[in-house]
Image (spheres, helix red, strand yellow):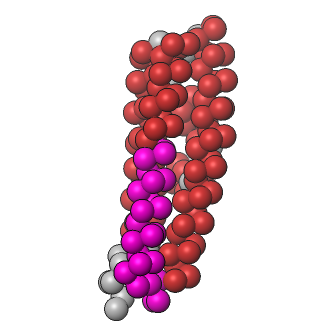
Amino acid sequence: DIDFIQAMYGKEKKDIVAGFIKLEGTQKDAFWKLYDEYETQRKELGKKRVSLLERYAANYGTMDDASTDALMKEMNALGLKTDKLIDTYYGKIKKESGVKAAAQFVQIEIYLLSVVRATILESIPFIGELD
């Protein structure tokens, strides 16, 4: 995920977020502490997503209904975990840095995740496309 963002925008993800969310004083310190916690957890989910994509690519030509179903269930579960993580940190950031910062956090995260996901989807074949 991070490599895609850096390649697309020419800067680190944290720099993009910092340019979008403007805070001062204790709100700023609290936000970045929470954001770093969030990123640690998001990166773990990202590693699982990459592993899932690698399995998809490696097994694309031999996937049957059972393996396709298992892949979809795992993909959906990762999406739900990512959404829950964003929601959890929305609440934490709202409490420590205010509603505006929390809402901006959600907006930029969803935007960046959507761009990364769209880029990935454009570069892999749909299930059954190459049959």
Residue 80 visible to the viewer: yes
Residue lying farthest to the front in this orientation: 66
Q: Is residue 59 magenta?
A: no
34, above or below 5, in the image: above
At 52% from the left edge and 28% from the top edge, which residue is drawn?
89
Q: Is residue 73 magenta?
A: yes
Q: Which residues are magenta?
A: 60-82
At 42% from the left edge and 15% from the top edge, which residue is drawn?
99
Residue lying farthest to the top in this orientation: 25
Image quadrant holding the C terminus, namely: bottom left
Residue 20 visible to the viewer: no
- Given residues 129 and 9, the one toward you in this image is 129
Q: Is residue 129 left or right of residue 86?
A: left
Residue 37 position by quadrant:
top right
Residue 76 position by quadrant:
bottom left
- Given residues 108 and 83, the one toward you in this image is 83
Estimate the x, y position of residue 49 in percent, counting from the top left.
Answer: 54, 59
Q: Is residue 5 left or right of residue 40?
A: left
At 44% from the left edge and 84% from the top edge, which residue is drawn?
63
Image quadrant holding the N terminus, namely: bottom right
Estimate the x, y position of residue 108 in percent, counting from the top left.
Answer: 44, 35
Main SS, magenta residues: helix
Estimate the x, y position of residue 56 in percent, counting from the top left.
Answer: 50, 75
Q: Is residue 54 left or right of residue 90?
A: right
107, above or below 91, in the image: below
Count of numbered tags: 0
